[in-house]
Image (spheres, grey):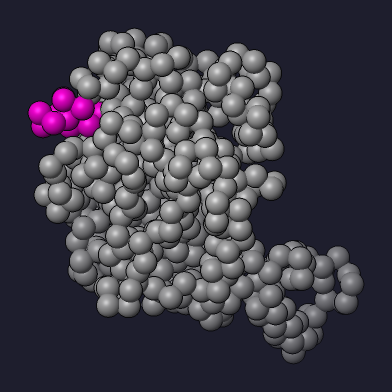
Amino acid sequence: MSVDPKLIRQKIQRLDAGARPRVLDLFSGCGGISLGFQSAGFEIVAAVENDPDAARSHGLNFHHGEDRHSIPRNITVTSPAALATALGLGAAASAFDVIVGGPPCQAFARVGRSKLREIAEHPEAFRHDSRARLYIEYLAYVEACAPLAVVIENVPDMLNHGGHNLAAEIGEILASKDYVVRYTLLNAAFYGVPQMRERMILIAIRKELADDVEFPAPTHWIDLPSGYQGSRAVALKLATGRDLLTEATGGSAYKAAPEAVETLAPAVSTQQAIGDLPEIMARELLAEGALRRGTRRLDAMLPYGGHNQQNDYVKEMRTWPGFEGSSHVRDHVIRYLPRDYRIFAGLKPGDQYPEAHRYALSLFEAELERLHAQGKRPEDGSSEWDALKAAFVPPYDAGKFPNKWRKMEATTPARTLLAHLGKDGYSHIHYDSRQARPISVREAARLQSFPDGFRFAGTMNPAFRQIGNAVPPLLARAIAQTLRSQLVRGVATEDLPRVAGAGR
């Protein structure tokens, strides 16, 4: 189905007249991309998110918690027309200027290029294919809404997933629909995010507006660890050189990201990001009975207190317009891990599970010696001995799970936050041995660059999942600022608003 040129002209004229570009966020989660785009002067008009807690978070932060914006929506059963009608936006084709988001790559893994072409031409043909279903729906939204631009975010493996460069395959479809397409890899640490998070970013812009696509210039510098460099090399194996997208479209393909240079500001460190937050002395709270097993709700408010390190990053997180912090911190809650707090205290920055396991064994041996001195040492192999060991030593094989634990370094950005952080917070153990604990929900939010006034619906584990799944707002803002300068003719990036007000 071809797009009416008049509709495209009307959208361009609207932006040229000074209107804010209207964004539809698909697979929005709690709203990391939305927040970044809103901050760059875009209007967040609608979102589609299937997870109930994440959908409520998005509605709470961008639409005053209105019911119609806070309900979960399954993209496979919510058509663009139905969404526009439910939100009172009129016709879907004229309601949005930009579509952002990223269908989970598992949904279209191993779907070949020929099948993707057929999906684009005959979207009903492969609805039975669970691997392609979400991708079909995503394309259907682009087809129905005729956006001026599309932004897709995903994991780097999307460039080399089962032998397929899925970004190139998606780009080929978008290019056939009159978009100029480029994709690259961006690391969030280069854009002021205190986290070394590598992501694939694909941007498609209507050919009426651009003959190339620009990516944001880095604002910070870090020498990334070798593991990140190696992962990037694997991901780019199928993206370098000429590919079928290049041959089909005359140049719309992989584009190397702008390089960061050492003269830029150093990357924001973990300590700079979370060092001002109230200390949580886990072992002391456990001994006092103040830390117990049970649901961790997000309604507790802790005063910032005197631990007030006001660097530029902290100031931005506390004063983000529309999402300002207060005199108290919200969501500063941690997992209940009574066996492991003492292990955390003995680890050095950068230590992982093998070091943790050895230290736990040393604690167990010390306890056996203490009991021996009292004449109470259990017999080796007895049930009492087994129970005592279980109280000190985690059961995981140190050879099989070397990366299961990691104590963060204070002076570098954090490693990538994961969606299952709520169930396995060991990947981000606080660098402060006195506190000896995993990071809190609010600390995770800070490491993703969510401001202190951003609200997360649900309890602790759903909040961790929302944060881990999100696009860092500061990375999204950098992308949005550069994109807006390409969409709105005559507007330079430096003229764009740095932070726009929230919609709550």
Residue 487 lies, with reference to residue 130, above or below; the image says below
The region drawn magenta spans 12-23
Quadrant of the rendered image containing residue 88: top left
Q: Is residue 118 visible?
A: yes
The image shows residue 54 at horizontal and vertical percentages of 43, 35
Residue 131 lies, with reference to residue 360, above or below; the image says above
Which residue is depicted at the point 21% across and 27% down?
12
Which residue is depicted at the point 16% across and 25% down?
13
Q: Nearer the viewer, residue 64 or 111?
A: 111
Which residue is depicted at the point 45% across and 64% down?
196
The image shows residue 312 at horizontal and vertical percentages of 20, 66
The image shows residue 379 at horizontal and vertical percentages of 88, 77
Residue reaching furthest bottom? 373
Which residue is depicted at the point 43% across and 58% down?
256
Quadrant where the C terminus is found in the figure: top left
Left or right? Give the position of 498 relative to 102: left
Residue 54 lies, with reference to residue 333, above or below; the image says above
The image shows residue 358 at horizontal and vertical percentages of 70, 79
Residue 41 lies, with reference to residue 119, above or below; the image says below
Left or right? Give the position of 287 relative to 378: left
Left or right? Give the position of 17 relative to 411: left
Q: Nearer the viewer, residue 216 or 347?
A: 216
Quadrant where the N terminus is found in the figure: top left
Q: How many marks?
A: 0
Q: Is residue 464 visible?
A: no
Q: Report if residue 59 lies within the magenta region.
A: no
